[in-house]
Amino acid sequence: MLGRNARRYTLIDKHLFKYGYSHPLLTSVDDEHVNQIFTELHESIYGSHIGGIALSLKVTRASYYWPKLKEDNHWYVKQWEPCQKHDD
C-alpha cells in the first residue's frame, strides 16, 4: 500500500509534490499554510465564499494539496455562517 501511494508523490529541490489528474504537479502544503490558502481563496479579493466541494476544487486548481483537503474545506466553510447554505 505504501509503495502504491508513494508513486503519487515526488521531491523536487526538497519540496514535496503530488501528481494530480488535471494539473501535472500539486504543491503539498503543511498545516501552517492551510489557513492562509483558505483565506486567499475564500475570503479575499479572489474569494467568492463558496461551499466545501467547490472550495476544494478551487484549491486544487490553484495547484495545492494536503491529505485532509476535503475535510478541512468543509470545516472551514462551516465557520462562515453565510456560506453554510452553499456547502455542497
Image (spheres, grey):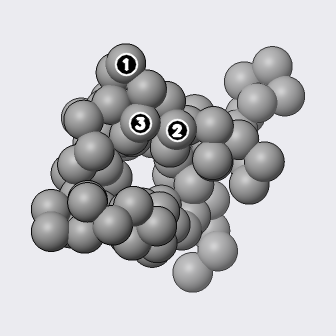
- The residue at 28%/45% (across/down) is 49
Closest to the observer, 14 or 38: 38
For marks 1 and 2, give the CA distance.
10 Å
- The residue at 76%/30% (across/down) is 15
Q: Residues within 10 Å of mark 1 (few under 14, many from 20)?
A: few
Residue 7: in sight, yes or no? no
Q: Which residue is mark 1?
A: 45
Which quadrant, please, contains the C terminus?
bottom left
Q: Residue furthest right?
A: 14
Q: Which label was assigned to residue 43?
A: 3
Closest to the observer, 82 or 1: 82
Q: In the rendered image, which quarter is residue 19 located in? A: top left
Q: Which residue is mark 2?
A: 39
Residue 87 shown left or right of residue 78 in the figure: left
The image shows residue 31 at horizontal and vertical percentages of 74, 54
**Element assignment for label 3:** helix
Q: In the rendered image, which quarter is residue 81 located in? A: bottom left
